[in-house]
Image (spheres, rainbow, N blue to C red):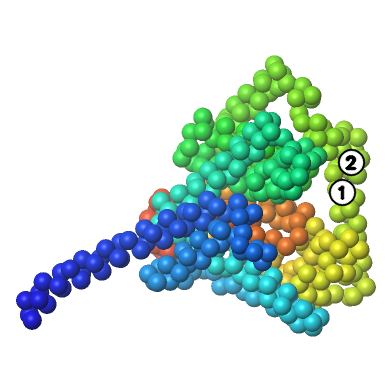
Amino acid sequence: MSEIGKTTTPHSHSDSHLRTLALPAVERAVLYTGVFLAPYATLRFSELFFTLSDFFFCLSFSLLFMTGRIGSKPLGEATPLWLIAFMLLFVGLMIGSLLHNSPERGLIVTAQYLFAYIFLMFILIRDEPKVAYRLAGIFLVSMVLIDIHGIITFYAIGYVPGEGKGVVTGGRRLATLLRNPNLAAAMNALTLPIPLFLWATGRIKSYVALPIIAVFIGTVILTSSNSGLFVTLLCLAVFTAFLSTPKLLLRLALAAGILAAVVAGFGSKDLLPKTFQTRVLGALSSGDISEAGTFVSRAALIEEALDLISEEQIAFVGLGADQFRERSVQTAPVHNLYLLLWVEGGLLALMGWIMFSAVGMLHGFMLRKAGGDKRVLAAMITTIVVFLTIALFNPHMYARYWTIPIFLCCGLGLAQLRQAADLPRASLSPKALSLKRR
């Protein structure tokens, strides 16, 4: 009996050790798959917006739980504030939904926000620098592949009648596999800080970064999205303003010079898509904003929202999740998240959602104070500014692809800090920082 025990014990220890090594590796592979598939939101299982990437995220979370590797404070000392922000959003939407007899809609919408703003935070922000950089790179590659596929389809195939929401719309606008031109443009602007950060830190060379940025800008132009073009230019302006180093300015001047040379030598307005000339350049040259696509209908929805807030005297309690659509003449949500949350969740929900961005900025400044590079701060603040601006043109933003770039930039910031100073997570606390300075 003792001999048997002696011979089996090493095997049991070996098997346990292999499982310990294998599960984290499997979990990372599952996570990488989920991040890669995140922009492909049309790959869903039902009408409840549960996508294929969500399935992999759930599996990743389960494996993290099994191995006891879920971090208690992904955002450091800012984590409790982030959770408070969600509680305000949840309470605001649920109270309104309960008071207006739509609790099921309240639960569905808040569950979506829970997944996008809480679960993904614990899943995506990692201690390991290599994992953080790989996640950012995988998401970037996914977006680039979507854009390249869209550009090729735009010129080689074009609009295909009868296929519903296709890669190219009937109005000759590039929608990519996201099936929405404005969404495609916004996602490119929201992802753009990642290649800018990797380029600024030297992790990707100019011959890689410039084509990626060119693909992003080219995609935005082909979408003929006014809001998308605006947030893309805003992204470049904010990131550049944060850094303004001679090296970065030289790189941007090089890129602008090459672009100017190409345009001067071969370009003209006629090379731009006709839809872009009509929707974007037409509005810019005439100064008539009504020519800018669907501005009139969206302005009408904004006016409806303001009237509803005034008539119902909505303060801290709103009308409940999805109730604006029910009352709207256009039977559509207002494409302004600030007004939509005010109407449906009251000021509680609105303050909670805005607090997310405030906490994200606080986390960025905490990383900077702890010794992080200003390029990290530039990427994080730029992403949040773009995110807040995109909310001016969109309804509920609980799709995972909205929050993933924010969490990836937070992860990059933590990874850069840990690589530069080899600081433990606890050093991000104000108490530890004060002790370190002593």
Please state if 51 lies on the left or on the right of 182 as rendered.
Answer: left
Are dots 1 and 2 in contact, CB under 8 Å? Answer: yes
Residue pictured at 68% horizontal, 72% vertical: 108
Q: Name the outermost residue toward the top.
A: 265
The residue pinned by badge 2 equals 291
The residue pinned by badge 1 equals 295
Residue pictured at 91% horizontal, 57% vertical: 300
State which quarter of the image contains the N terminus: bottom left
Q: Secondary structure at mark 2?
A: helix
Give whichever of 415, 336 is nearer the camera. Answer: 336
Residue pictured at 65% horizontal, 39% vertical: 150
The number of discs equals 2
Residue pictured at 77% horizontal, 31% vertical: 273
Binning the other alpha carbons within 10 Å of mark 1 as few (below 14), some (14 to 19) or many (20 upward) gives few
The answer to whether 363 is drawn above or below residue 141 in the figure is below
Query: In the rendered structure, which amino acid carries the disc numbered 2?
Result: Glu
Place of residue 298 in the rendered image (x, y in percent of width and height, measured from the top left): 86, 54
Q: Would residue 376 be seen by someone viewing this image from the given angle?
A: no
Q: Would residue 100 be seen by someone viewing this image from the given angle?
A: yes
Give whichever of 61, 51 is nearer the camera. Answer: 51
Could you give the CA–CA distance between mark 1 and mark 2, rounded to whole angstroms?
A: 8 Å
The answer to whether 121 is drawn above or below residue 165 in the figure is below
Query: In the rendered structure, which amino acid carries the disc numbered 1?
Result: Phe
User: Where is residue 319, by image quadrant?
Assistant: bottom right
Please state if 304 lies on the left or on the right of 130 as rendered.
Answer: right
Place of residue 359 in the rendered image (x, y in percent of width and height, measured from the top left): 61, 64
